[in-house]
Image: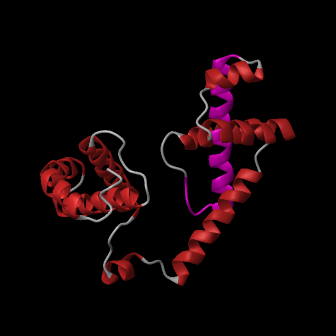
Amino acid sequence: MRSMTDGTAFAALYAQHYPAALRTAQALVPHHAADDVTAEAFARVYAAVKAGGGPSGEFRPYLLAAVRNVARTWLAASARTVPVGVPELRQHAPGAGELAARNEELRMADRAFARLPARWRHVLWRTEVDGAAPADLAREWNMTPNAVAQLASRARIGLAVSWQHERGTQERITGPLPALARLAARKNARRTA
């Protein structure tokens, strides 16, 4: 194989193995990219042969492995690239006012979260952000799973009340939280009285 650096022997291998390489590429990537993937795989194999490497055994398995590697690289790159036209960019690009509103909402959320007791912040972070299950936290904190679930529930209600306080009275919490929020507020008022 290493004697094929002149290109003529490699051209014969190209003619012989191109259909199989193309079929493999078509099975892995969209048809419009299969030719490019196949050509790139042949180019990489040829470069490896010219550099003194390349297959030590059969040519086709080595080539098909190169096709799979190039296809994997192509798929990863295409997953990161989302073609968007200029009008679409303008349509979805937030304006300065929208960015300022988002930033203010983030600051309010941060203040609402910071207003919570440390234990509530910790359980919310572990359950909502880290995705930890109450049973896992129960072992870690030497509590029952039900106690951890109740603590997380109270913390969520507390966060909702704190968020409502941050937003002001013009927006009300919807769903089952208003009644629970009122209960939590009464309970907190009794503790401070």
* Res 99 → quadrant: bottom right
- Where is residue 163 shown, x and y percent of the image? 65, 54
* Res 70 → quadrant: bottom left
Residue 193 visible in the current orientation: no
Quadrant in which the C terminus appears: top right
- Span of residues in magenta: 144-172
Q: Nearer the viewer, residue 116 or 181?
A: 116
Relative to 21, is 126 on the left or the right? right
* Res 92 → quadrant: bottom left
Residue 191 to residue 95: above or below = above
Residue 177 visible in the current orientation: yes
Relative to 125, is 67 on the left or the right? left
- Where is residue 90 shown, x and y percent of the image? 38, 82
Relative to 99, is 186 on the left or the right? right
Q: Identify the residue shown where x is 36% and y is 42%.
A: 56
Q: Nearer the viewer, residue 58 or 34?
A: 58
Q: Nearer the viewer, residue 185 or 10?
A: 10
Q: Identify the residue shown where x is 26% and y is 65%.
A: 7
Residue 106 magenta-highlighted: no
- Where is residue 51 shown, x and y percent of the image? 43, 60
Q: Identify the residue shown where x is 78% and y is 36%.
A: 119
Q: Main SS type for the magenta part?
A: helix
Residue 124 to residue 45: above or below = above
- Where is residue 73 shown, x and y percent of the image? 38, 56
Q: Nearer the viewer, residue 22 or 193?
A: 22
Colour pattern: secondary structure
Residue 171 magenta-highlighted: yes
